[in-house]
């Protein structure tokens, strides 16, 4: 293999292991692996079997467990029967300024944007009325005459999306206008959805991604205080939230009550059963490991992976897809630097030396965020599979940051991320027998 082709293979592998989820149809076609089927089945059941056709579903799980990719595939699977609008709140609203009002307004914008993209046959008069309503509230001039054939819709809603993302003044105006008249905003949302449903002959399904990336305090503020407003629209909506927020008793109770217990939790893949975790020679859950190895092999050719290295990457990930991508991406970065450093080497592979260096880098990343209290909680969680207080904010932060991983079977239990476990061992915080 020439040094040029080797460089290109690693460049492609590096790009393939980017941390962004698979959202586009061509990405899903190329990299999709059957994963999270139980969660997918739950989502289908809750949407398809809801008699009122306005299901409100909470979808949760660890950051990076594959929720976004699963939701994109779910939306694609249902697109023949539903008018599916899938969007990232992070790409629509400045994350530090998200509230229930601009979430609802973002739904309205994305409904119209998708209708324009798919050229849904809505009468010019109705479209014009919608355009003027949006334009007036986002301070955009619409010069097209009311009776003209309109072609500005797509551009208009792209502009609005940009304004929502970058202009705090627009977000403040929306908040002031609708804070005491949320019913007007919801009424407009329902009107838009009804028009789209009538024109497309499909039920509306909105999927909002990346709400789980919000700070926990923001999530509590939105869903604890304003969940009734978020659940008012008369069509199907899936909201994502971080798994750590479900540890809050009051918020969890509110979510379960308002959502009629329609909460789906996507679990982390268990690579080891709880009872095998501290054994010297544990029995691994090979089916789960093989699925994650398949994910990896779709992105990195086996020819540049030393035998068994994919399995080692999977084991270091703790069963979290994002962590597997993070490890493999870091390995590719190391290899690309080495190939450029020694261009005459033509048989370079990701081996144990490369993996060890990647793990060291990631271990240092974890270490920089941890303090004395964190180490105490991590040690106790490692020893007991449970912290002293699962509701303590410091523990929730560790759960949110993936230092601690939640697993589920007959019970909920926790373990420390394998790379963080390595860190604890190096600091002498774990017993020699651990």
Image (cartoon, rainbow, N blue to C red):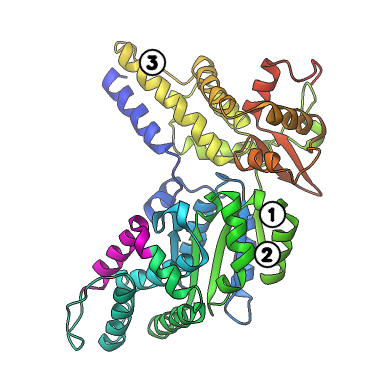
| Quarter in which the C terminus is drawn | top right
Q: CA distance from mark 3 to mark 1?
A: 48 Å
Residue at point 63%, 36% (across, down): 289
Q: CA distance from mark 2 to mark 3?
A: 54 Å
User: Based on the displayed image, in which of its 4 quarters is residue 196 positioned?
Assistant: bottom left
Residue 316 visible (yes or no): yes
Q: Nearer the viewer's eye, disc 3 or disc 1?
A: 1
SS category of the residue bearing label 2: helix
Residue at which label 2 appears: 255
Q: Is residue 224 left or right of residue 381?
A: left
Cβ–Cβ under 8 Å for marks 3 and 1: no
The x, y position of residue 40, in whole percent, is 60, 59
The x, y position of residue 134, in whole percent, is 33, 75
Residue at which label 1 appears: 246
Instruction: Give me the disc on residue 347.
Output: 3
Is residue 282 one of those drawn in magenta?
A: no
Marker count (numbered): 3
């Amino acid at each position: 293999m020439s040094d040029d082709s080797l460089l290109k293979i690693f460049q492609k592998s590096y790009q393939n292991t980017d941390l962004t989820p698979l959202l586009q149809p061509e990405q899903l076609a190329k990299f999709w692996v059957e994963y999270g089927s139980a969660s997918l089945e739950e989502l289908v059941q809750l949407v398809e079997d809801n008699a009122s056709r306005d299901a409100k579903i909470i979808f949760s799980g660890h950051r990076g467990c594959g929720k976004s990719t699963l939701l994109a595939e779910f939306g694609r699977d249902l697109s023949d029967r539903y008018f599916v609008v899938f969007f990232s709140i992070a790409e629509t609203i400045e994350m530090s300024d998200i509230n229930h009002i601009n979430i609802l307004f973002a739904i309205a914008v994305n409904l119209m944007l998708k209708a324009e993209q798919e050229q849904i046959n809505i009468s010019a008069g109705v479209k014009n009325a919608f355009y003027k309503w949006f334009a007036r509230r986002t301070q955009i001039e619409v010069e097209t005459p009311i009776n003209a054939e309109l072609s500005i819709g797509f551009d208009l809603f792209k502009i609005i999306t940009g304004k929502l993302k970058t202009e705090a003044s627009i977000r403040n105006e929306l908040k002031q206008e609708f804070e005491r008249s949320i019913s007007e905003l919801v009424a407009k949302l329902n009107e838009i959805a009804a028009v789209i449903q009538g024109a497309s002959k499909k039920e509306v399904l909105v999927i909002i991604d990346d709400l789980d990336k919000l700070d926990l305090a923001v999530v509590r503020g939105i869903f604890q205080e304003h969940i009734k407003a978020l659940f008012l629209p008369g069509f199907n909506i899936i909201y994502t939230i971080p798994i750590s927020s479900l540890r809050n008793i009051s918020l969890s109770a509110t979510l379960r009550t308002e959502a009629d217990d329609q909460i789906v939790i996507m679990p982390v893949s268990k690579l080891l059963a709880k009872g095998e975790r501290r054994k010297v020679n544990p029995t691994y859950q090979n089916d789960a490991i093989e699925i994650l190895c398949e994910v990896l092999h779709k992105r990195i050719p086996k020819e540049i992976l030393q035998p068994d290295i994919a399995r080692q990457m999977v084991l270091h990930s703790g069963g979290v897809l994002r962590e597997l991508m993070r490890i493999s991406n870091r390995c590719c970065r190391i290899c690309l630097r080495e190939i450029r450093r020694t261009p005459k080497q033509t048989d370079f592979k990701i081996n144990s030396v490369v993996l060890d260096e990647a793990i060291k880098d990631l271990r240092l990343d974890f270490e920089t965020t941890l303090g004395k209290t964190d180490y105490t909680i991590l040690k106790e969680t490692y020893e007991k599979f449970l912290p002293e207080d699962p509701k303590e904010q410091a523990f929730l932060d560790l759960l949110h940051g993936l230092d601690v991983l939640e697993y589920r079977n007959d019970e909920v239990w926790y373990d420390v991320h394998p790379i963080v476990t390595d860190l604890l061992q190096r600091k002498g915080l774990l017993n020699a027998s651990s």
